[in-house]
């Protein structure tokens, strides 16, 4: 799981800066935005396997009255097989089972594929609900 999260942070940093990551950059990003709360009772982190190897992940942070979607990531060599849609379906099912009726997220403008995925699966762009340093778009989905 740690290697999957490192790959997520590496891609986020590389895409944001438009260059290869520098030594220590991923570790610093992981320390600035830890994933420790993506475990019971404050959240969950789901890992998807393909061909017996960790291929993707998605997390939820539980908030009062809603949950925050985070760490949505599919390794590049596993993309194009519906992994993103499967992650969203799995995490939404878990959220519903936990009594969560609303999922929110923030994302960046350069993550075009992610924004397309969210919109395709019923997430609607909403006004800012946080002041995240990298947040440029905010989405919400009301679960039925």
Image: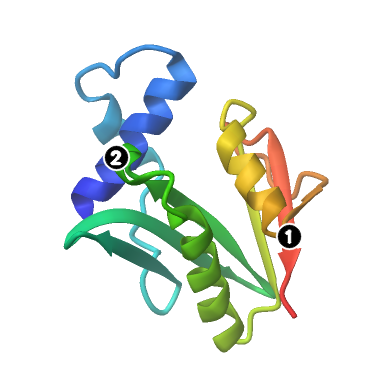
Give the farthest residue toward the front: 81
Residue at figure coordinates x 54%, y 69% from the top left: 89
Label 1 sits on residue: 122
Instruction: Tell us which disc is closer to us: 1 or 2.
Output: 2
Res 93 quadrant in image: bottom right
Res 134 quadrant in image: top right
Nearer to the camera, 140 or 55? 55
**Does the rendering let one see residue 131?**
yes
**Earlier residue among tags 1 and 2:** 2
Q: CA distance from mark 1 to mark 2?
A: 26 Å
Measuring from the top left, give residue 112's x and y in whole percent.
Answer: 61, 32
Measuring from the top left, give residue 55's x and y in whole percent.
Answer: 28, 53
Give the farthest residue toward the left: 52
Label 2 sits on residue: 77
Judging from the image, what secondary structure is the residue with disc 2 in? helix
**Does the rendering let one see residue 29?**
no
Say whether marks 1 and 2 touch (CB < 8 Å): no
Measuring from the top left, give residue 102's x and y in whole percent.
Answer: 71, 70
Residue at figure coordinates x 53%, y 59% from the top left: 85
Rendered image: mark on residue 65? none
Q: Quadrant of the C terminus?
A: bottom right
Nearer to the camera, 112 or 82? 82
- Left or right, residue 123 beside residue 3: right
Q: How is the image coloured?
A: rainbow
How packed is label 1: few (under 14 Cα within 10 Å), some, or many (20 or more)? few
Residue at figure coordinates x 65%, y 73% from the top left: 64
Judging from the image, what secondary structure is the residue with disc 1 in? loop
Q: Quadrant of the N terminus?
A: bottom left
- Left or right, residue 74 beside residue 124: left
Residue at figure coordinates x 48%, y 64% from the top left: 86
Give the farthest residue toward the top: 19
Measuring from the top left, give residue 63's x and y in whole percent.
Answer: 60, 69
């Amino acid at each position: 799981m740690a290697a999957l999260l490192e790959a997520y942070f590496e891609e986020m940093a590389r895409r944001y800066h438009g260059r290869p990551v520098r030594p220590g950059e991923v570790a610093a990003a992981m320390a600035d935005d830890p994933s420790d709360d993506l475990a019971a009772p404050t959240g969950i982190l789901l890992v998807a396997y393909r061909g017996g190897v960790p291929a993707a992940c998605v997390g939820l942070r539980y908030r009062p009255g809603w949950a925050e979607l985070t760490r949505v990531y599919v390794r590049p060599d596993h993309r194009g097989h519906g992994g993103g849609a499967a992650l969203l379906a799995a995490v939404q099912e878990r959220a519903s089972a936990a009594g969560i009726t609303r999922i929110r997220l923030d994302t960046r403008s350069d993550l075009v594929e992610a924004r397309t995925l969210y919109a395709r699966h019923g997430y609607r762009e909403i006004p800012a609900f946080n002041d995240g340093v990298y947040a440029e778009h905010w989405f919400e989905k009301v679960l039925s």
